[in-house]
Structures are given as structure tokens and as C-alpha cells.
Image: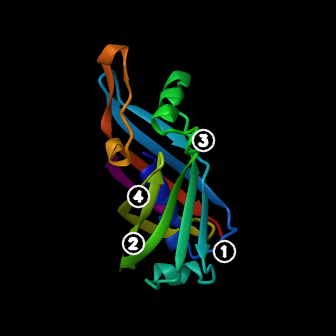
Amino acid sequence: MRKIIVTAFSLIGILGAVPAAAQSTGTLSVSGTSTVKAWTCTSTQFEVKALPATAAPSKVLAGEKAIDAVTGKFPVASLDCKNGKMNEHMLNTLKAKANPAVLFELLSYDIERATPGATVQARGKLTIAGSTQPVEMKVTVTEAPGGGLRVRGEREFMLTAFGMKPPSLMLGTMKVGDKVKVSYDIVIAR
């Protein structure tokens, strides 16, 4: 679940083309299923750094590659499932004590479409629960109301791909599904 979240951050950075110190707001959510019910956990905390941060958002939306490097960091403890016990199981699954953050590093990207917004295919490496894997994702970037950029997207992945074991409770009668979806809608202000 963090994989997608971090990927979202990285894409924000790539597409942002705004100063690295710019304020970012928005929501990240991780959702999945279990044998009992579907679930969703959300967060509004993240850190994205993009270099260089000199291009205007209009250039990015016009299809210009303006970012050379992007890193993202997401504190796993900031996810809230609106259920204390579920939060505890999620932190255990993410191995939060040993790995308190999900990390992303952008390696390359392509701008596939440039009007009215930009569609970006990003490639990077994502570290979740101490496991680093290559990741690709597609994001949509548009101009945000009041300036800046709005970055949106989603991606599915398997917990086991990052060495995590989906939680199982009550002697296996309650199991969390291996597949999770990370969705994000983030505004990077100017």
C-alpha cells in the first residue's frame, strides 16, 4: 500500500515543477478487502523534493520535462483506518518500527500527453517495509485552482511483492487480501 503512496509522491515531484519548498496538500488513501469487509486508510502527510525546481507549471503542462530528480517520503504511522486495532495491524504489516517511512526515488519519466493536462509515465524505486522494488506508474497532472498543480492517480500492487504478509486473525477466519490500491489527489501550490 505504501508503494503506491510513495509513487504518488514521486510523481508529484516530477510533475510539480514547483519549488521544492512549496506546500503540498491533498489525500492519499490505501484500500483493500478482507474476508469481513472492504477497508480504506487515509493520510494527508508526505514530503516530496524535486530538483531542479525552476520550471513554471505551465511548461510542465505543455509537455516539457523540467525535473531531473524526485524523492518522496511517507511516514507509515500517518495512515488512519478509523479503527485503532486495524491501525495496529497495518503498522505491524508495514514493519513500521524498523521501517517508519515509505521511500520513493524517481529514475526516469515520459510525458505522454500534454493537453489539457499532462499524463506522465514514471519509473522509479520504491522502498516499503524494508524491501526495495522497481515501480512504474501513470499520473495525471492539471492546473490547480489558484495556481500550482493537481496530481492524481492510483495503482494496485501486492503486499507480498514487498515481503509483507497480509494480516490474518481469529485462526485465519479473518484475512486481509494481498492486493491493495493506493489512490492520491494532491495539489502542489506555487
**Pointer 2: what residue?**
120
Question: Is mark 1 in CB contact (under 8 Å) with mark 2?
Answer: no
**The residue positioned farthest toward the right in the image shown:** 21
Main secondary structure type of the part rendered in magenta: strand
Does residue 81 lie above or below 157 as drawn?
above
Residue 77 in picture, x, y percent from top left: 59, 39
Whole-number angstrom distance, CA of label 1 to CA of label 3: 24 Å
Residue stretch rendered in magenta on the structure:
151-157
Q: Which comes before the other along the chain, label 4 or label 3? A: 3
Element at label 3:
helix
Which residue is found at the position 41% from the left and 48% from the top?
182
Residue type at the position of mark 3 = Ser
- The residue that disc 3 covers is 78
Q: Which residue is the site of mark 1?
A: 19
Cα distance in 3D space between marks 1 and 2:
19 Å
Element on which disc 1 rests: loop
Q: Secondary structure at mark 2?
A: strand
